[in-house]
Amino acid sequence: MSMSTDEVEAAIEAGIENCEATVTTPRVPDEDHEDAHFAAVVVSPAFEGKSLVDQHELVYDAVGDAMTQEVHALEIKTYTPEEYEKHGQ
């Protein structure tokens, strides 16, 4: 049973303060082997002053146990609110 994008979003938002997560499935799932491949755009002031590795670590920690069991691949883009605004979203 794989997670829905909403469940992954909820897990990320619960784990990182003042966070807004948008999770999509960029690839069509493979019927034969549940390919739970997700892409997450995560915006939070918690990323301020942290390296990209540390920012991604926060997201992986938020997804937690589901990461190994249900989420097979997670592409992450992290932004502070200021970066996100500059990014033109």
Image (spheres, rainbow, N blue to C red):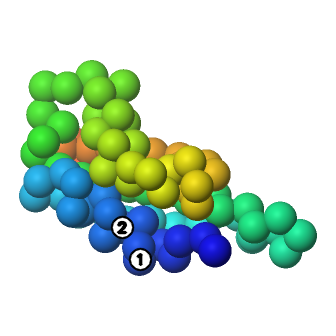
Up/down of 10 relative to 55, above or below = below
Instruction: Report the disc number at residue 51.
Output: none
When asked about the image quadrant of residue 53, the answer is: top left
Which amino acid type is shown beneath numbered disc 2? Answer: Glu
Q: Nearer the viewer, residue 15 or 86?
A: 15
Q: Which residue is mark 2?
A: 9
Which amino acid type is shown beneath numbered disc 1? Answer: Asp
Up/down of 28 relative to 75, above or below = below
Q: Which residue is mark 1?
A: 6
Q: Secondary structure at mark 1?
A: helix
Determine the CA span between mark 1 and mark 2: 5 Å
When asked about the image quadrant of residue 27, the answer is: bottom right
Is residue 57 toward the left or the right of residue 50 in the image? right
Residue found 63% across the figure and 52% down from its top = 72
Residue found 20% across the figure and 26% down from its top = 50
Residue found 65% across the figure and 62% down from its top = 36
